[in-house]
Amino acid sequence: MTDYAIEIEGLTKTYAAQRGTGPKTALHEVDLTVPAGSIFGLLGPNGAGKSTLINILAGLVRKSAGQVKIWGFDQDVNPRQSRASIGVMPQELNMDPFFTPRASLDTQAGLYGVPKSQRRTDEILRTIGLTDKADAYARTLSGGMRRRLLLGKALVHSPQVLVLDEPTAGVDIELRQMLWQNVRKLNAQGMTIILTTHYLEEAEEMCDEIAIIHQGRKIAHDRTDRLIGQLDAKTLVIQPVDPAPEALQLPDGVELERRANGTLAFSYFRNRTSAEQVLDAVRAAGIRIHDVATAEPHLEDVFLALTKSSEDQAA
Ligand SMILES: Nc1ncnc2c1ncn2[C@@H]1O[C@H](COP(=O)(O)OP(=O)(O)OP(=O)(O)O)[C@@H](O)[C@H]1O
């Protein structure tokens, strides 16, 4: 057992120049550790370098510099063991239309050198809910079933680390729930899960830790709750008894949004202003309070704040 499922140091990838474009550095000296047994989110805007990082982990793209260890195995020193420790569910749905799910899983297990006696084809078919489609041609499977088959293929060699690249992009709610149920179950059995997603709410709900990559650099990495706690922003929503007056004297740095339902949303930073000061200002304006609620920032706010400040620094 290792403390870290993944250890990355100084990882750099520069794609060679292509016709019309110069070389492109997609990852700049990224250091990253993923705790064993965690569900880990890798987030970033389009083109940030997430797929490049995942493809390097999967052994599909060659790094330009740096060190990558998977389950303690250095990719350069123990390529076979490091590859055997990881399973990747890719984004694309390409698959051989004349293969059945059973044949796909068997072939994949063969590619990983899993002996016939140790194959878990039926168990995996059950896990991904494709038992009754086991012998149907892949071309007759729905998009959702194909995705589940891709998950199954990533599991044939019982990897310690499972990587899911945008597993829920464009899938319906039912399939999304099924995928997350599977992910939680595999994680409860001890598998480390790394996922990329564009749905920040999903990352917030699923992930123990999150790293944010922007323009090829890691700009944040922390426990999900701490990452959200980093933002000091707070919103106090007040429902007045009577319609609020136009003029309101507010402490510096407090912003007021008048919402369509008549509520007043005051946004402020806790290190500058207290809730008491906001409430005092409300009472001073003669507003009688019917109800009060507070709202904490979401991952989306953190994400926007961090990617924006990293752009400002780069400018
Ligand atoms: N094979 C390649 N050759 C040249 N440049 C590439 C290649 N693959 C990716 N890039 C470039 O590297 C950068 C990072 O791309 P990457 O696909 O890793 O980002 P991403 O974070 O996965 O984005 P998305 O969320 O859109 O999938 C982009 O600028 C992309 O254009």
Image (cartoon, grey):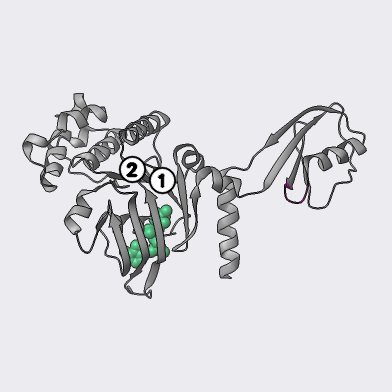
Q: Secondary structure at mark 2?
A: strand
The amino acid at mark 1 is Phe
Q: Which of the 4 quarters of the picture holds residue 182?
A: top left
View quadrant of ligand 1? bottom left
Q: Dot 1 corresponds to which residue?
A: 40
Across and down, in percent, residue 230 comes to 60, 50
Dot 2 surroundings within 10 Å: few (below 14), some, or many (20 or more)?
Answer: many
Kindly give the residue lying farthest to the top in the view shown: 132
Across and down, in percent, residue 169 comes to 40, 42
Q: Mainly helix, strand or loop, the magenta region? A: loop
Q: Which of the 4 quarters of the picture holds residue 260?
A: top right
Magenta segment includes 224: no
Indicate left or right for 196 with 78 as reference: right
At 38% from the left and 70% from the top, the residue drawn is: 24
Label ID, residue 55? none
- Front residue of this view, candidates 117 and 105: 117
Q: Dot 2 corresponds to which residue?
A: 192
Across and down, in percent, residue 309 comes to 60, 61
Mark 1 CB near ligand 1 (8 Å cut): no
- Front residue of this view, candidates 214 and 81: 81
Indicate left or right for 157 with 197 as reference: left
Tag 1 and tag 2, C-beta contact below 8 Å: yes
Q: Magenta span covers which residues?
A: 269-273
Indicate left or right for 99 with 76 as reference: left
Across and down, in percent, residue 249 comes to 89, 46
